[in-house]
Image: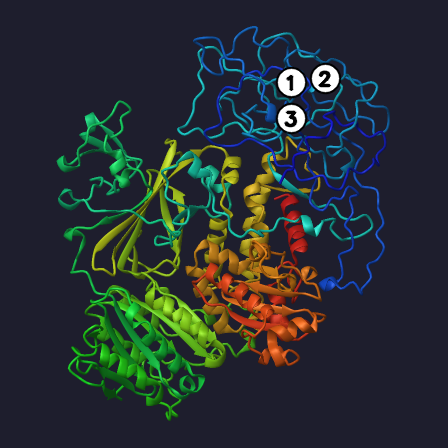
Amino acid sequence: MGTENPGRPSFPARPSATPFAAAPPAGTPFLSSGPVAGPGVSSFRPLPAAPPNTLPSVSSALPAGSDGSGFRPTPPARFNDPSVSSPPTTHVPPTGGPFQRLPTPPFPSMAQAPPARAPPVGSQPGQYFPGQVSHPPVSFRPQPPPVPMGSPPQRASYAPPGVNFPQPSSDSSFSAPRPYSQPSFTPVDSTYPSARATLQPPMPGYATVPPNAVSQMPTTASLFPSHQGSYAPGPPGPPPAASPFPAHQGGFVSSSPLAPGLHAQHSAPPVGVMQNLAEDFSYLSMGSIPGSIEPGLDLKALPRPLDGDVEPNSLAEIFPLNCHSRYLRLSTSAIPNSSSLVSRWHLPLGAVVCPLAEVPEGEEVPVVNFASTGIIRCRRCRTYVNPYVTFTDAGRKWRCNICSLLNDVPGDYFAQLDATGRRIDIDQRPELTQGSVEFVAPTEYMVRPPMPPLYFFLIDVSISAIRSGMIEVVAQTIKSCLDELPGFPRTQIGFITFDSTIHFYNMKSSLTQPQMVVVSDLDDIFVPLPDDLLVNLSESRSVVDTFLDCLPTMFQDNVNVESAFGPALKAAFMVMSRLGGKLLIFQNTLPSLGIGRLKLRGDDLRVYGTDKEHVLRIPEDPFYKQMAADLTKFQIGVNVYAFSEKYTDIASIGTLAKYTGGQVYYYPSFQATNHGEKLRHELLRDLTRETAWEAVMRIRCGKGIRFTSYHGNFMLRSTDLLALPAVDCDKAYAMQLSLEETLLTTQTVYFQVALLYTASCGERRIRVHTLAAPVVADLSEMYRQADTGAIVSLFSRLAIEKTLSHKLEDARNSVQLRIVKALKEYRNLYAVQHRLGGRMIYPESLKYLPLYGLALCKSTPIRGGYADAHLDERCAAGYTMMALPVKKLLKLLYPSLIRVDEYLLKPSGQVDELKNIMKRLPLAAENLDYRGLYICDDGFRFIIWFGRMLSPDIAMNLLGPDFAAELAKVTLSEQDNEMSRKLVKVVKKLRENDPSYYQICYLVRQGEQPREGYLLLANLVEDQIGGTNGYVDWLTQIHRQVQQNP
């Protein structure tokens, strides 16, 4: 967030002689400085020589919203309508106390590094030698408060040019500088914008210290506690000279070289230890406009994730052999070494696993077949061999990186070690060089022969399903992708349809057309012709094709409104239980007959907002959870496709998908003409994407820590074994970890995800992802290495689960409370050394967390109350979000908003013109120009917003003769003109970026209510809508709670 300004003079700022100093330039950027963790951090910092005539580059800081005047301009009119005039803006002097503080002296520019002075030969880094410092350090002692008004203070003592002295006390620990970063001034309290990095020539009465005279003392490892507000004694020497300046941090810290004989201790790999007191946090100035209750924040400067999810790569630099973050992400890459540190973290501590995540084009996970050797595993903890195991005893033994047990190397796997201890064949062993690998499992990993890919379809044929066109779309889609089903020629297939009775279909290959058998006894279900209901697709292809051609017309005159879904489900289970497979349910009517029948719920408004509200979001009948347990036991995964304009109790039916590793697809008010393409695409992807069958997953971790809770769509078979009958690339699982021991003694913790599954080709395989992470004793390091995406994924799953036992308001409050606690704890780390004043501070890694927290509270599963989302819609969204990978979840919470009318008006053929328009805009109504055309994309649908003053030519070109009609009745289709083709190209490009779901285009014109409200305005998470907080109010509310005393 910092910006380099190499052309500015590098003189200390002059303290203002008046309490109301001139405002700094409005273009002053954010501060972003501080220590960094990684291999570049050393325990020794050489003493730099002073390069002549070198002016340091300065990275100064300005709080968000500060234009130098300490006030907030009046927000622009809604939708940027220039016809609405803005009130005149008046510059008001900044408020605050009269105290000011000088910025820290500038350091030598990193762009022109001074030559390093090596330590004496034979010395240890960080060892103290008499005479190494030619002048005692300048001391900053606490002084009585200065007089508010008066002349600038005089410096009593200063180091003459050429004399080396340690950095002043604004840097308490003297840790190594961040590589390639520019030094920065420490900003003063936000109520004094005048003193915030405003560089002025030295004034009379100030001793000028050449900036190049500053050199650094060697840093030490964390042998001295780096508690905020404490002090460390300096080396022996003459008493330090008194300074008339008030202490910068209210404490005393000076250089502390190690005593002779003490050596710096490092973990491997090294992670930054004692933290720099320079402001290595980001902040927003939260002061209000004088005479107003409006917070003085510049909306344009607020942190927003306009680049989407950015995968963390800090671990990749330290541990290059780790698996990619698309497979495994930790909520923080710095593992706490003690339970007390965990208790101060306040955010979820855990991981998000997506074991079958799609790899980019051209990459693949290597497949290893040990054949006769057998898979190499630790005999105690069963860890698979990975890049972090070490070989000893001339290659005859290997040490497990998780439990440290020494294992024998099988003879067929033996290889000599080179001089560095590496195997000489390591380049031919991907399991020793890559963090993700797939092993071919031998027969001992099978309890039965590998199952064939099996697809079974359970289809509702009641009158509502017929009239909506659902059956026709489903039949056509299944037929179109039969050649693409994985596992040919082993693939099995079968069908059952139902209304008030159950219809079985004999598709034996010797038949010319299928035979239908109707069972009307719903109380005593039996399966007729059990051997002919599941058939080999390649053998019975012609019969299956005939059935799918006839299915839409077979029930076209059906007027049955009943649904025997429960008995039909039991029948499908009885057919599939011998092999397992994937059960696809197409449900259009509330189950009304036989076992598992359901009744209308949620129409009693008095329940909402009470302690009984959560009952509406859990299964009404235990039949469905019991069926899910039975289905999982027999390796049957369920995907539910729900279509209805009426209540169908997704809370109960979705349980089948939740506990079998499946997912819920929800199409409210489905009509084939409007939603057919979405159903066609999503069903096609469901049937043709690579699937892992009859899978189980376990994640192992190092000694002293363990995973305690798991969140997602699965059945927990034992304390740590996840049963997943069917897994694919669109499923992710979250888990929380805790410390088993009070204190971790290891320097590195290892995690290993193992997914044992049957591939569609018939092989039993084990996909293994291994990751290493450093153990730290510093809370600030945990925050610095935090991963917002993983934290939000855990937050969302925990909040959704909380709605199943508490009120929606409790779930929202829990999210806000944990964010407040985390930011309060982080603020306490710096409250002693820095004058934080009205600033809201946060680590750079978590700058988007408050906004994602707000978006989560406004998401469909936990927002508002009865009137804010239909019960089925809320439950379906909850089931979906529980299974989403990180990137898709973050996009759903904070959708993309892009403007396209300017692109449509440009002539074609410009280079990268399509890429240029993908610039995302903040989700606020003020960014919508009433003359523009915008697309809002949340990964599940497109909302195309037409400004009320959009050029009629554009609307006519895009919509044809319907351009003036009500857009709710208009469907976007390609017209015969260049502008329409360009818009279709944009939409197609956006769909290609995220093929998991098909985004239907919903057209809405500005001012069309209520359509605009529930389609677009509900997605503008930064605005106040329906009594909910806007982004500014949310930040203000969080900041006030952070500042409150516990």
Q: How far from the left and from the top, in percent, is residue 564?
A: 33, 83
Location of residue 738 by image quarter: top left
Left or right for 811, reference 480: right
Q: Name the residue that disc number 2 marks.
A: 209
Q: Residue at x 81, y 48 (%)?
A: 290
Instruction: Report the amino acid beneath label 2.
Output: Val
Q: Say left or right for 489 vs 317.
A: left
Type of the residue with mark 1: Val
SS of the residue under disc 3: loop
Disc number for residue 214: 1
- Name the secondary structure under disc 2: loop
Pinpoint residue 464: horizontal percent, then vertical percent.
43, 86
* Residue at image coords 57%, 49%: 848
Foreground residue, 980 or 210?
980
The residue that disc 3 covers is 170
Q: Secondary structure at mark 1?
A: loop
Kindly identify the amino acid type of the residue bearing the numbered disc 3.
Ser
Q: Earlier in the sequence, mark 2 or mark 3?
A: 3
Whether residue 893 is situated above or below residue 315 in the rendered picture: below
Circle 1/circle 2 CB separation < 8 Å:
yes
